[in-house]
Amino acid sequence: MIFLNQCLQGIFLGAYYALIACSLSFLFGVMRIINLAHGSLAVLAAFLLFVLADRYGLSPWLGLVLVIPVMAALGFLLQILVLERSLKGGLLVPLLSTFGLAIVIDNLLFQGFGADTRSLAPYIGDLSFASWSLSDDITVGQLDVIILAAAVALLGGLQLFLARTRLGRTIRATAEAPEIVGLIGIDARAVYALSTALAMALATVAGAFLALRATFNPYSGGMQLLFAFEAVVIGGFGSLWGTLIGGILLGVAQNLGAFVNPHGFLIAGHGFFLAILIARLYLGPRLARLRLARLRPRRPRPHAARPA
Amino acid sequence: MPLLTVENLTATHGLLHAVRGVDLALAEGETLALVGANGAGKTTLLRTIAGAHRAALGRIRFDGADITLLPAHRRVPLGIALVPEGRRLFAGMTVAENLLVAEGRGRAGRWTMATVLDAFPQLRPKLKSRAGDLSGGQQQAAAIARALMSNPRLLLLDEVSLGLSPAAVEQLYVSLAALPAGGTTIVLVEQDLGRALGVADRVVCLLEGRITYEGRARETTRARVLEAYFGVSSALGAGADR
């Protein structure tokens, strides 16, 4: 029963990892950028929510309504001022520029808020510790259930948005052939900026749940990025449902590691990630077929003229 | 007033001058065949008119307005659409999605999903198929249909028949032949000279980026075009009139 409970708690933890990985996966799917500032941007959003709650007494849920547009606007600027220019320099430059941005954000947060750890848990009342008992050995945190529901809703909603809406189709078309969309009247630059804004909105939600379920400090971004990256790699880059599954597998692996040995939490997660990474390297195409859904479709083949 | 005027247009790929001082005027409703050997500058000329390639020198006017500096996505609402070489569909999206993504970005007009499917009925059973899974002929039909969804006044078609079976080409040209009747002006890059002369009102031949022949299609002989095509004055194809 304890084993079952560990697995269940791992699923809830993994749902949080999926949330934090969602934005990373989306941005990579659209622009082929691995945003190394992703964790720091989520932590920045957490600090903004903290300020609203601590100084102005605004509930974190209401705070989200204010912070999401601010972070989306920041994402728009990030694309125009940093990513767009970086992309012109090849694949390595966006990595370096977002890495640099992460360092700047972390240190600005340290300068402004100091090294103290903070949490939004005190601002949501009983919800931070309230739980349901399913049996004597299994309890389920109410906040954990909300996080799981949010992860499924966000990733599923994003998948539906991309598949069913006009803007979603525009983003997918731009992700597939940015050099062609101009010929049908789409401004690829605007789509990229809008996508980065959307990615920042997603990162804000992730930052909010980070602050609600745990503590954070100005340097928490690196670890969040690492977990997000591992979830995305396990689930398959650019695959949204894969990201959800990747996050859950990572959470379960960590919890089972802790079940075997109290110090095994992190090492089990990293070990599982490495095992998947190595398997991907050697079995790449066969494993790729296991992906459940893709944001970025299979490689286009239209250039090769096929006989009728 | 011509619908499209190209004045002294030069376009480069690095140090290479792909198009050199081209002058061209196109009346509304006209079909122009652009012919020439590989590397003659046909594709670059088409891409420059569409805004996908930057003009190094010269001017492009569309319906009287100077569009030389406009990016491609801002030329579409004016009524310019390019069907690029190699089709370049969004291969991971369905045929219906390829058409829908282009809908409503150009002008209002007669081309809608329904009328486009009437013009290219071969696409109707394939609407839910991934564009990358279609045959070459179906892909070309989908690419032209996608361009029509913006209701272009000027349709630029690059290498329509390249890599297609004769039956697929025949089917495509049946659909294309009906377009000028709806007022669409067409510039057609075509390797099949007989086919180009058959559908065009006027023929322009490019050689090394320059126009070497321009004339009415019905007055143009195959031999005359071939002479301009290869840049040699000879009895090449003598007696091989259309």
Image (cartoon, coloured by chain):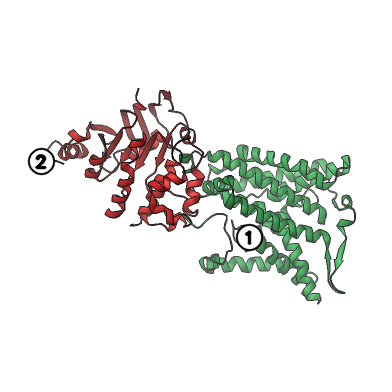
Q: Residue at x 62, y 37 (%)?
A: A81
What percent of the width, then of the height, locates residue B124?
43, 53
- Looking at the rendered structure, the secondary structure element under dot 2 is loop
What percent of the width, then of the height, locates residue A261?
78, 73
What percent of the width, then of the height, locates residue B241?
13, 41
Q: Nearer the viewer, residue B207 or B196?
A: B196
Left or right of B119 in this view: A136 = right
Q: Nearer the viewer, residue B79 or A278?
A: B79
Please identify which colour was used for chain B in the image. red
- Chain under callout 2: B
Q: Amino acid at mark 2?
A: Ala
Q: Which residue is mark 2?
A: B238
Kindly check if marks 1 and 2 are in contact, taking CB atoms under 8 A apart as contact: no
Is residue A182 in sight in this rendering?
yes
- Chain under callout 1: A
The relative height of residue A272 versus residue A81 in the rendered view (above or below) is below
- Looking at the rendered structure, the secondary structure element under dot 1 is helix
Left or right of B171 in this view: A111 = right
The relative height of residue A124 versus residue A274 in the rendered view (above or below) is above
Is residue A40 in sight in this rendering?
no
The relative height of residue B83 versus residue A142 in the rendered view (above or below) is above
The relative height of residue A245 versus residue B48 in the rendered view (above or below) is below
Please identify which colour was used for chain A in the image. green
Left or right of B131 in this view: A161 = right
Farthest residue, direction bottom: A1
Q: Quadrant of the N terminus of chain A?
A: bottom right
Q: Residue at x 23, y 43 (%)?
A: B193
Q: Which residue is mark 1?
A: A241
Q: Amino acid at mark 1?
A: Trp
Q: Nearer the viewer, residue B19 or B87?
A: B87
Q: Residues within 10 Å of mark 2 (few under 14, many from 20)?
A: few
